[in-house]
Image: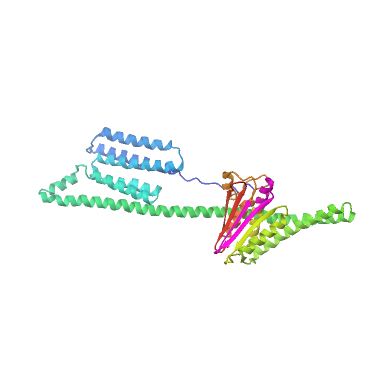
Amino acid sequence: MNSIFSRKEVKADHPIQQLQRFRWVLIALELFASLIGYLLEYPIHSWSLLCFVIAVHVFTNISLKLWRGDKGSEQRFIAISILIDLFMITALLAMTGGASNGFVAILLLPVAVTAVLFSALPSYLMAILAIGCYSLLLQVPLTTDAHAMHQHHSVEPAGTEPFSQHISQMWWAFSFSAFIVSWFISAQTQRIRTTSAQLTTLQQKQLQHEQVLAVATYAANAAHDLATPLQNLVLLTDELTEQQQDPALAADLRQQLQRCQQIVQQLRTNAQQLRKGELQSQPLYNAIEHSIQLWLVSRPEISMEQHFSSDQSPLTVTDSISLAAALFNILDNAADASLQNKEPKLSLTMQQLNSQLELQIRDYGPGLPDKDLAQLGKRPHQSEQGLGLGQFLANVSIDSLGGKVERENCAATGVLTRIVFNGTPL
């Protein structure tokens, strides 16, 4: 059985690892630009200062690999690293011509990375910072030939107006590009995240359905295999009764065997109804109330305090068989917990109002640790009583019917299980 519920998990790249790879590419570009500048004898403000800035950038990137922290501090650390990238690039550009440097568009890279790793607001803030850095770079004296040509054409004082207009156009073009990059990448990243979350949810549901199908297959095979042994046991019981060795024991044995035959027959009947699609919708409130009363008959040792109310709003369920099976599992688990604490009782509250139904089941057991309670019903797990499938199948069945199961520890003792249906269940 354990092999059925196992599946390989593919771990996605950590955001810090993604940022680190991006920064190595960025550092490589910085080194390449510095090498080109050295070979072409490009005027550099200070080669020693340039090497120091690149060395600091390399050191901060190596420190990313050593980072260990919680999720909140991790986000802050990534944001600080991207800010360092922005300021490092600004410093490098300031030492190599300012806004006249052909690599000035590299200022858009931190904006793009922020848009990928964060939501829209931080990416817009990073775009504003990048625009501010670009504005500072415009104050660096222009020393390239292209701008000397601009100065050559501006012999008269009035001739400086085209050059000022050119600078203004450069600023507006960079600002427009920064916001477009931030908006477009943020929108696409958010769409990818939403799609990824939906795919993850679908994969989890598919896994649950495969697990349920596996359990259903085993149950069907068990029902088929039990039919013949049960029939043989009935014949043996008849022989014991005829010999009259212990009539009371034989009668009790016959009663238990008849109960087993009824369960197997009910399994067959339910399976036939599911295959033929003969399930009929009925009011959800009535289906739950009927299931609870049937469960009480099977557990006479449990006393139950009930508080039920309904406004008769339209709320129906089509698969009452799956619903009853899920409720039986949850109620059995709650009853066993109460008996474990020597408190053979349960408290049930059911309220239907405005096409919304909420059922609360409170047991009086010892409760569960928060970690175990959070995982209860989400996946099959081994338990002392068996395979631990009951709560898992109950959660899957109720989820497939449009409901939701929540559990929490009570203030005193016990666990409160809350089942909520909104709208018409499936």
Work out which quarter of the rendered image holds the C terminus and state it. bottom right
Residue at x 51%, y 52% (from the top left corner): 200
Residue 380, compared with residue 323, is above or below; it is above
In this orientation, which residue lies closer to the viewer: 151 or 274?
A: 274
Is residue 347 rendered magenta in the image? yes
Q: Residue 328 in the image: x percent, y percent?
A: 66, 55
Residue at x 84%, y 54% (from the top left corner): 250
Q: Residue 356 in the image: x percent, y percent?
A: 55, 62
Q: Residue 196 in the image: x percent, y percent?
A: 47, 53
Query: By what rule are the colours in the image chosen?
Result: rainbow
Residue 20 shows up from this direction = no
In this orientation, which residue lies closer to the viewer: 397 or 282?
A: 282
Q: What stretch is highlighted in magenta?
A: 334-362
Residue at x 26%, y 34% (from the top left corner): 47
Q: Residue 109 in the image: x percent, y percent?
A: 33, 46
In this orientation, which residue lies closer to the viewer: 187 or 350?
A: 350
Residue at x 67%, y 53% (from the top left corner): 218
In this orientation, which residue lies closer to the viewer: 130 or 196?
A: 130
Is residue 121 rendered magenta in the image? no
Residue 235 shows up from this direction = yes
Judge left or right: residue 236 versus residue 119. Answer: right
Judge left or right: residue 128 versus residue 4. Answer: left
